[in-house]
Image: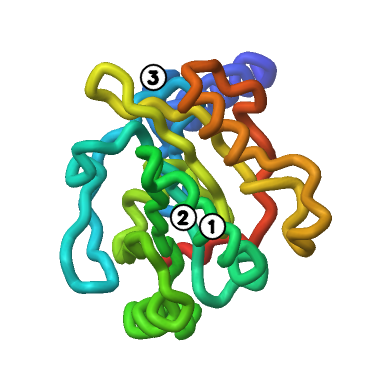
Amino acid sequence: MKTKILIIVEVLFFSGLFSTFSFKKVDAAEPVKSPNVALGYNIGDVVADFKLKNINGKMVSLSDFTAAKGFIVVFTSNHCPFSKSYEDRVIALDSKYASQGFPVIAINPNDPDAYEEDSFANMQARAKEKGYTYPYLADDTQTVSKLFGAMRTPQIYVLKKEGGKLILSYLGAIDDNAQDPSGVTKRYVEDAVNNLLAGKPVVTTTTKAVGCAIKWKS
């Protein structure tokens, strides 16, 4: 009798326990929706156009550059020492490749409340001080940064225009020496753009970006 009672109790207990759980079918293709998790483009992906505010107050889209063959998109910032170290090299990239159809588009993804140095006013001041020849855009909502999958500053995305679409062709670091420009032995971005201009495939398509972690809004 006691055994029967115990079995009945166990059945009722576990029935009640499992009834408290709800199971949801998860689509493997469904993106992560956490506001602090970057989705990210992969090599070969089509990159969506976007519109962000430039330091001159005007809105800028990639589609504005009708003659462009592609873009060197760099996520960068004012406060990060790695971004500062690469700043002159980014300016040099634009000087070398903008006239050949691959202009630099710089985007600041950081929360300015976390880093005052990354405020819009300070972005304007820094661009004027260094004589930026390219747009320096503020990603206030951080939507574009998350769409790209940017995680650090600086981080580079080389896009090529193909059949009216923008295809991600290179992702990662500018070169192999963040601290010393004179010690650079591998120029990843230059090699990628040179190959694209010559109609050749990019050999090294992905490298590890070295820099400061992006400060996401809470």
Q: In the rendered image of this protein, does residue 53 appear above or below residue 65? A: below
Q: Can you tell which mark lies on residue 95?
A: 2
- Left or right: residue 195 compared with residue 111: right
Q: Could you say which quadrant of the image residue 55 lies in?
A: bottom left
Three-letter amino acid code at disc 3?
A: Asp
Residue 170 in picture, x, y percent from top left: 54, 32
Check contact, mark 1 vs mark 3: CB within 8 A: no
| Residue in the image at 22% along x and 49% along y | 61
Residue 8 in picture, x, y percent from top left: 55, 19
Residue 171 in picture, x, y percent from top left: 55, 37
Q: In the rendered image of this protein, does residue 197 appear above or below residue 176? A: above
Q: Which residue is the site of mark 3?
A: 27
Q: Is residue 22 visible?
A: no
Separation of disc 1 and disc 2 at Cα? 5 Å
Separation of disc 1 and disc 3 at Cα? 45 Å
Q: Is residue 122 visible?
A: yes
